[in-house]
Amino acid sequence: MLVVKTIREVREIVKQWRKEDLSVGFVPTMGYLHEGHQSLIRAAGENDRVVVSIFVNPMQFGPKEDLATYPRDLEHDKEKCIEAGADLIFAPDVSEMYEDNFQAFVDMNLLTQELCGLTRPCHFRGVCTVVTKLFNIVKPDRAYFGKKDAQQLAIIKRMVADLNMDIEIIGCPIIREADGLARSSRNVYLDTQERKAALVLSKAVNKASELINSGERNSETIVSAMTQIISAEPLAKIDYVKVVSLDTMQQISEINNSALIALAVYIGKTRLIDNFFYEGE
Ligand code: AMP
């Protein structure tokens, strides 16, 4: 497995693969890789070659967010990538991705303005911009994203369709710890007490799934049952708990066909997300 830091090197390597008629799968990440990321890398193994990017993208962090403290460990990430079967890591410095006079961006209406977009107003503009740049650099056939970031996945799919990017976007299931907590690089921020408290997210998601599977269709009832579970935990503070349409991210009052049940909760200072996607009968 190769590790490169420059756009030029990535382009040269991928160009060579293309000459050999090899297909390319791509997994964009911010590093500090865990089983969730590895599941995407393994899924990308359906291509002849797999590229993983590791880049903590400043553009998607708000001024009061955790850009400076976001966990970074390239040696650990290399091992995780080798284990999962990646062929190339692209780990650029910020200056490689953003020149001093950088000015362009990619943004979207509506989808980016709901859920996480309300608390993190410029977040998805940063995500769309960096993913577009990475797509232009790697030029993959397929790119793999986790359903844990359900809104991000919906936004990337919309962006690729709207801007005619010739890339297939593949959503992969949420990978959880044995006790249910969704794997996240940010879980490392949690102390022992917070780690226990963080279980309210998956408990609330399970409750929603139970209710829906037993026939409940009223969003208010579902949200209220989830809220009750989370509010019982003193270390938890709800950002949002919502039942939305996956196409629009707008709230729906009744679940008719499919629905995304999504939540963001602060556990102490750490903001965690989780969700459940109901696909209909
Ligand atoms: P991040 O490094 O947090 O930006 O995540 C990079 C990619 O890994 C995104 O597509 C995430 O949705 C995905 N991912 C992160 N955590 C998980 C998880 N627990 N299960 C599945 N995919 C995940």
Image (cartoon, helix red, strand yellow):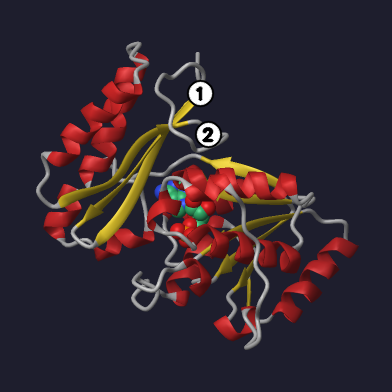
Q: Which residue is mark 1?
A: 258
Q: How many marks?
A: 2
Determine if residue 131 is in view: yes
Q: Depth check: 223 or 26 in front?
A: 223
Under 8 Å from ligand 1: the CB of mark 1? no
> What secondary structure is marked by label 2?
loop
Quadrant for the N terminus in the image: bottom right
Image coordinates of residue 259 in percent, x first then y, are: 47, 27
Relative to residue 191, is residue 69 drawn left or right?
Answer: right
Residue at the bottom extreme of this rendering:
100
Callout 2 amino acid: Leu
Q: Residues within 10 Å of mark 2 (few under 14, many from 20)?
A: many
Callout 1 amino acid: Ser
Name the image quarter holding residue 187. Answer: bottom left
**182 over 251 or under it: above or below:** below
Image coordinates of residue 150 in percent, x first then y, are: 49, 43
Q: Residue at x 84, y 69 (%)?
A: 16
Image coordinates of residue 119 in percent, x first then y, are: 37, 56
Cα distance in 3D space between marks 1 and 2: 8 Å
In the rendered structure, which disc, 1 or 2, sits on the residue that comes first in sequence? Answer: 2
Name the image quarter holding residue 11. Answer: bottom right
Confirm or deny contact between disc 1 and disc 2 (CB under 8 A): yes
Q: Residue at x 61, y 66 (%)?
A: 130
Q: Depth check: 22 or 260 in front?
A: 260
Q: Residue at x 53, y 50 (%)?
A: 112
**143 over 269 or under it: above or below:** above
Q: Which mark is residue 246?
A: 2
Residue at the top extreme of this rendering:
215
Q: Which mark is residue 189?
A: none
Image coordinates of residue 207 in percent, x first then y, are: 26, 27
